[in-house]
């Protein structure tokens, strides 16, 4: 089946540094990917929709200059958290639309636990 | 605007008993409804979906869900719970206007006691 690989699974970084999270579709081409943020014991908050070859569409309240999304190829989308601060610590999850699976054909990555110290 | 409500933060059930995790939704058009399960520090796994057709949808691991249009509900059910079903469950909705944006409920933690 369709697999989305997300790396790293865990990352600890110092405050003020930048962190890049990768989301790869391994056996299909993903023209559309989504980035979510999940706070402890809370639901997934959609941050942005990433479309291959074009600018990401950010949800209201999400700082696009802080959360840089690049979808330069049909198999890779990246989320870069710039100048990270402790409040950016969270669980980040990507998902991809799987072609040919009809409505609801989303596959999720395994998530990245970001801790900013 | 789309919204999803999962009224219970946690559901406790004994192993072997039936379980129900509740979900209600609101969309402008016709709903596309989904259930996902999440294990600790992992991404989401798809369980089942309702697009159209039969109101009772069967999915993975013995789970099923019933679409009720008049009550705008899509409750997740399983006839006999297993300890391994203990996890976080999310209901999600999309409308039929053609976009991909999916809204998730707050999640319900299911705890199955042996």
Image (tube, coloured by chain):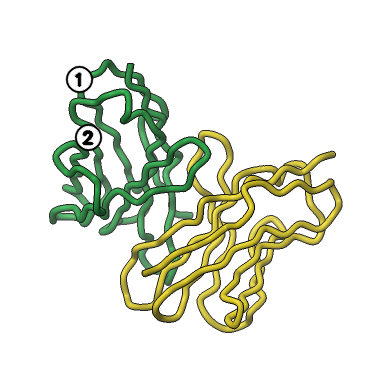
Chain colours: A green, B yellow
Label 1: few (<14), some (14–19) or many (≥20) C-alpha neighbours in 10 Å: some
Mark found first going from the N terminus, 1 or 2: 1
Q: Quadrant of residue A96?
A: bottom left
Give the left or right position of residue A24, taking residue B30 as reference. Answer: left
Camera-nearest residue between A21 and B104 = B104
Provide the residue designation for mark 1: A16
Give the left or right position of residue A70, taking residue B95 as reference. Answer: left
Give the left or right position of residue A65, taking residue B32 as reference. Answer: left
Task: Give how far across and how far down residue B39 sits, in percent.
Answer: 58, 40
Provide the residue designation for mark 2: A80
Task: Give how far across and how far down residue A115 sits, in percent.
Answer: 37, 23
Residue ranking furthest to the front: B7
Q: Which chain does tag 1 point to?
A: A
Give the left or right position of residue A100, taking residue B110 as reference. Answer: left
User: Residue A36 shows which numbered tag?
Assistant: none
Camera-nearest residue between B78 and B72 = B72
At mark 1, the secondary structure is loop
Question: Which residue is at 29% across, 34% downward?
Answer: A21
Question: Which residue is at 26% across, 24% downward?
Answer: A85
Badge nearest the viewer, 1 or 2:
1
Task: Give how far across and how far down residue B31 sits, in percent.
Answer: 47, 75
Decide if residue A29 is in sight here. yes
């Amino acid at each position: 089946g369709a697999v989305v690989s997300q790396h790293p699974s865990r990352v600890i970084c110092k405050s003020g540094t930048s962190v890049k999270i990768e989301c790869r579709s391994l056996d299909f081409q993903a023209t559309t990917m989504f980035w979510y943020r999940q706070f402890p014991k809370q639901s997934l908050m959609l941050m942005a929709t990433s479309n291959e070859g074009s600018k990401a569409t950010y949800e209201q309240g999400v700082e696009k200059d802080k959360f840089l999304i690049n979808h330069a190829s049909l198999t890779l989308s990246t989320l870069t958290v710039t100048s990270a601060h402790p409040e950016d610590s969270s669980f980040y999850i990507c998902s991809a639309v799987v072609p040919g699976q009809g409505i609801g054909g989303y596959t999720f990555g395994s998530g990245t636990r970001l801790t900013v110290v | 605007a789309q919204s999803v409500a999962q009224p219970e933060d946690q559901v406790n059930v004994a192993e072997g008993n039936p379980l129900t995790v509740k979900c209600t939704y609101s969309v402008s058009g016709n709903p596309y409804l989904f259930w996902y399960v999440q294990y600790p520090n992992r991404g989401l796994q798809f369980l089942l979906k309702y697009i159209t057709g039969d109101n009772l949808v069967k999915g993975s691991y013995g789970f099923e869900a019933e679409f009720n249009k008049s009550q705008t509900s899509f409750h997740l059910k399983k006839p006999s719970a297993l300890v391994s079903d203990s996890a976080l469950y999310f209901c999600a909705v999309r409308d039929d206007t053609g976009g991909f944006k999916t809204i998730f409920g707050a999640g319900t933690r299911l705890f199955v006691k042996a």
